[in-house]
Amino acid sequence: MEGQKIIQAVTDLFTGADERDWQKVRSVMADNVLLDYQSMTGIEPGMQTPEQIIDAWASFLPGFDKTDHQLSEFRVRLHGHEADVHYVGKADHFLDGELWTISGSYETKLEKQDGTWLIVYLKLDYDKQTGNTGLPMRAKQKLAAQQ
């Protein structure tokens, strides 16, 4: 039962991003999240608020026609009110009939706060990207042109 709630929280993070439902994304994050995408971006891991994470994603993802995050192979380890989750992820980003895909695995930590499992740590272990790697810049340009 708890394992399913934990997996649902993780899934909601990514489906919320795909749906551009930022409230859904916010609802599964603690007040501070240690975000670590260093293996892909080279940027040092850092503590961020959900609003900072959402602002970053909202300035990028809506520039794509569609995104589709696919998660699988969940392994959940419970430690009382804390949980560690490992899973495989693939993110397809579509723009103007072209595709950019990132794949890797994730390490995510959650804490049960007031009866709700919330993400406190999100780490991507980047594997590879395929397709048109120029699409992220085009997505940002598309968004900027709309403003």
Image (tube, rainbow, N blue to C red):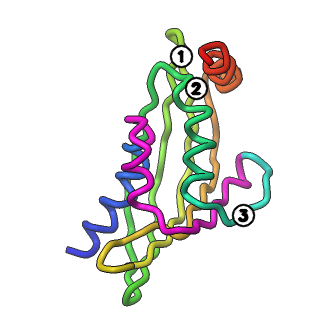
For marks 1 and 2 on the same chain, the one whose residue lies earlier in the sequence: 1
Q: Nearer the viewer, residue 111 or 97?
A: 111
Q: Where is mark 3, residue-wise?
A: 46
Q: At numbered mark 1, what does the secondary structure look like: helix, strand or loop?
A: strand
Image quadrant occupied by the C terminus:
top right
Alpha carbons under labels 3 and 1: distance apart:
30 Å
Q: Residue flagged by tag 3: what amino acid is it?
A: Gly
Q: Residues within 10 Å of mark 2 (few under 14, many from 20)?
A: some
Q: Residues within 10 Å of mark 3 (few under 14, many from 20)?
A: some
Alpha carbons under labels 1 and 2: distance apart:
8 Å
Residue 13 magenta: no
Disc number for residue 77 = none
Left or right: residue 86 versus residue 53 is: left
Disc number for residue 100 = 2
Q: Where is mark 1, residue-wise?
A: 95
Q: Nearer the viewer, residue 1 or 56?
A: 56
Image quadrant occupied by the N terminus:
bottom left
In magenta, the rendered stretch is: 17-40
Left or right: residue 6 versus residue 119 is: left
- Report if the CB atoms under discs 1 and 2 are less than 8 Å apart: yes
- Residue 113 image offset from top left, x and y in percent: 39, 79
Q: Residue furthest top?
A: 96
